[in-house]
Amino acid sequence: MRRLVRSRNGTVGRVSEGVRGGHKRLRGANRPWPGVRRTRAADAMGELIDRLLNGVLIVDSTLRPLYANREFLRLLGLPDADTLLRPAGLERFLPEDNRQVLLDMTHRLFSHQSQRASQRLEVVRADNATLWLDFSAALGRWAERDVVQIAVVDATERVTHESELEFNRAQLENQAVELVALAEDLNAEREQLETARLDADEGRRFLQTLIATIPNPFFHQDLEGRIRGCNAAFAALHGRDHRTDMFGLTVADLTDAAFSSRTERLDAELMAKGGNVSYEAVFADAEGRARTMIYNKAVLTDAAGQAVGLVAVITDITEQKRMEEALRRLATTDPLTGALNRRAFMEAARRDLALAQRHGEPVTVALADIDHFKRVNDQHGHATGDEALKTFVATVHGALRASDVLGRMGGEEFALILPHTALASAMLLADRLRQTLANLRVPCPSGEVEFTVSIGLAELGTHGTTIDTLLQAADEALYRAKSAGRNRVIAA
């Protein structure tokens, strides 16, 4: 006896059941189209269908599901196809009326009354959430029989947006009717109303012109956080058109979860206390670039003083921040090697030592000096010497932790702060660095240059309690390392 089954990866095959030993043999397993010998083209087509961004559903004339791709299963909230590929598998997901609509559409295709059919239906997911799906169906062949092939697209957001637009349109129509009725009942005030309307139009045009000319991004939103208006600069931040693509959206629709969560919290606080607020935030624009913004927001009130939403003006300070960071780097780093300069290193060292003393944690200070560096400069030129210094810093930075600090103290001498590191561990780290540096080669006009380093170590508490005393102790150890032949690590 043979029957169709689905394998674990979602494909379909035939199972032959025999009496010999009760074994079952899977024929055609891993084939996306039953009854067809597996080929590379068939495998590729099956994999392609299964990976389509649109949902795909294949049913017979009774609306029994025969195949569903991953996207359709995801839309229904199903982990696999087992529940769906049963008789009446669609019943739990379609309300009775909608199920009948889909069945009628299927019958029209099978009876050749139409070649294609489409319908938008409400569906209930496995987690009981509802969504709207667009079903586009056509007659096809599958497993040597006629079937209906249905492409499925999630239309929930579109339906929601259309409902909002329809609601707003109905509101506007109702208001228009009321205004007309009022105008008919108040003929005596027609002239005043006309004057007021003209004044309002003029004020609105003035406001729209003013907003359009503001170079800073600007928007206003209602109490639910939905955008009710913005200028082109704000829409451009999100890669959208302010005339068609922004109305009714929220910050959650336009930004990532972390940014929208913080913004919603700050907006709620502002609405609760009233007034205005200014804060800084890092925002990813439509091209994915991080931009630092200043958000100036104020509560928008009606004529009665009741809050109706927020207005916001945004200032991009990304370039200002970049210049500040560039100035900070110039003030704190060595321009040749990228290591901290002496002043910045001493500040970081005092901070780390104070923290370690407060918590009783070990800290080791290292002083490293490139051996015979003057000989490198004299024999191969200062450009080669500079490359040796940059190679040293890059190698040390690659071996350090984020908490470790490297600074250039002058010339070829460098200092390190190793927080949370006792002297014994620091000796091992320093010796590994020494060996790594000894094996490096620096290109030069005459070929390659190698260099070694000598390192002196001093531990907080044992050899001093300030950065000055620790550096002095490490310097004495470094001197002994040089005197002992260089290319070695010695502790104070």
Image (spheres, rainbow, N blue to C red):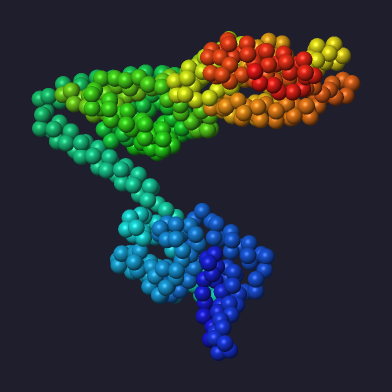
Tell me: residue 121, above or below residue 443: below
> Can residue 247 be spotted in the picture?
no
Q: Position of residue 342 (x, y in %)?
A: 61, 11
> Residue 117, can we see it?
yes
User: 253 or 228: which is nearer to us?
Assistant: 253
Q: How many marks?
A: 0
Q: Is residue 414 left or right of residue 100?
A: right
- Residue 397: x percent and y percent? 65, 26
Residue in the image at 63% along x and 11% along y: 472
At 56% from the left and 77% from the top, the residue drawn is: 14
Side of 443 where 270 appears, left or right: left
Q: Position of residue 93 (x, y in %)?
A: 35, 64
**Front residue of 337 and 115:** 337
- The residue lying at 20 percent from left, 21 percent from top is 196
- Residue 63 appears in which quarter of the rendering? bottom left
The residue sitting at the right extreme is 446
Foreground of the two, 91 or 23: 23
Q: Quadrant of residue 134?
A: bottom left
Q: Residue 195 lies in what quarter of the image?
A: top left
Residue at image x 70%, y 28%?
Answer: 431
Q: Position of residue 484 (x, y in %)?
A: 77, 18
In the depicted structure, whether residue 243 falls above or below residue 50? above
* Near-viewer residue (143 or 207): 143
Q: Left or right: 161 with respect to 241?
A: left
Q: Residue furthest bottom?
A: 19
